[in-house]
Amino acid sequence: MNAAPAETPKIPDFPQRADVVDRSSGENYSQVCLGPIEELGRYGIRHPLIGATAPGKVFLHRLLGLSGMEISYGLLPPRTSFPFYHKHKQNEEAYLFLSGAGEFRVADDVMPIREGSIVRVATEGVRCWRNTSAEPMFYICVQAKQGSLEQWTGTDGVGVPGEVTWPN
Ligand code: ZN
């Protein structure tokens, strides 16, 4: 396996509580395996300024060498809240909830969330979320620079001719 892309974050990353299962990269790609979703609790971050710890959270931009977005996986145990409020300087966020159920808060607005819910939050939205169910709440958060999207789907993706084949 090749080494992962050079790690040159602009600011120090939050410390990770556990290493990934495996990672590799090659020309035009990188991959990482975080392991089973139900074991995401072995990861976590500690916010360096607030001092609070969020178990089950792992950021991917450094692990994958992402250059235009940040993505994090998160796992909130049953009947727990994410431990602090935050907002952003540049990036909007989309939270994709894949299991569990609870509430998402932006300032004074509180909305129900459940499997299948997706919440977009603009930079200035002060946000938090909680899992009020008896199931683990698994979610993915995608960050990208607000207002930066210029092409998408059929305007950016380019089909490449040729029959799909796989090496044996
Ligand atoms: Zn955020």
Image (cartoon, grey):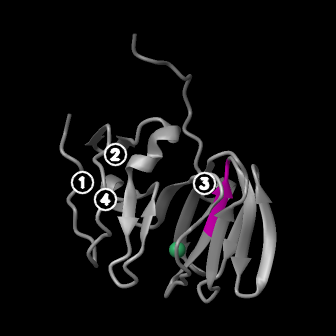
Q: Which residue is disc 2 drawn over?
A: 30
Q: Which mark is residue 139?
A: 3
> Tag 3: residue type?
Tyr
Please tell me which residue is depicted at 18% across the width and 45% down the height of the picture: 3
Please tell me which residue is depicted at 77% across the width and 54% down the height of the picture: 114
Q: Which of marks 2 and 1 is nearer the N terminus?
A: 1
Please tell me which residue is depicted at 74% across the width and 61% down the height of the picture: 102
- Magenta span of residues: 94-98
Does residue 152 show up?
no
User: What kind of secondary structure does the magenta stretch mostly adopt?
Assistant: strand
Q: In this view, does 144 lie to the left or right of 5?
A: right
- How far is disc 4 from disc 2 in space, using C-alphas? 19 Å
Q: Earlier in the sequence, mark 4 or mark 1?
A: 1
Label 3 neighbourhood size at 10 Å, few (<14), some (14-19), many (20+)? many
> Tag 4: residue type?
Gln
| 2 vs 3, front mark | 3
x, y percentage for residue 141? Answer: 56, 62
Label 1 neighbourhood size at 10 Å, few (<14), some (14-19), many (20+)? some
Q: Which residue is disc 1 drawn over?
A: 5
| 4 vs 2, front mark | 4
> Tag 2: residue type?
Ser
> Tag 1: residue type?
Pro
Q: In which quarter of the image is the N terminus?
A: top left
Q: Earlier in the sequence, mark 4 or mark 2?
A: 4
SS assignment at label 1: loop
Q: Earlier in the sequence, mark 3 or mark 4?
A: 4
Residue 96 painted magenta: yes
Tag 2–tag 1 contact (CB < 8 Å): yes
- How far is disc 4 from disc 1 in space, using C-alphas? 18 Å
Q: Which residue is disc 4 drawn over?
A: 16
Tag 2–tag 3 contact (CB < 8 Å): no
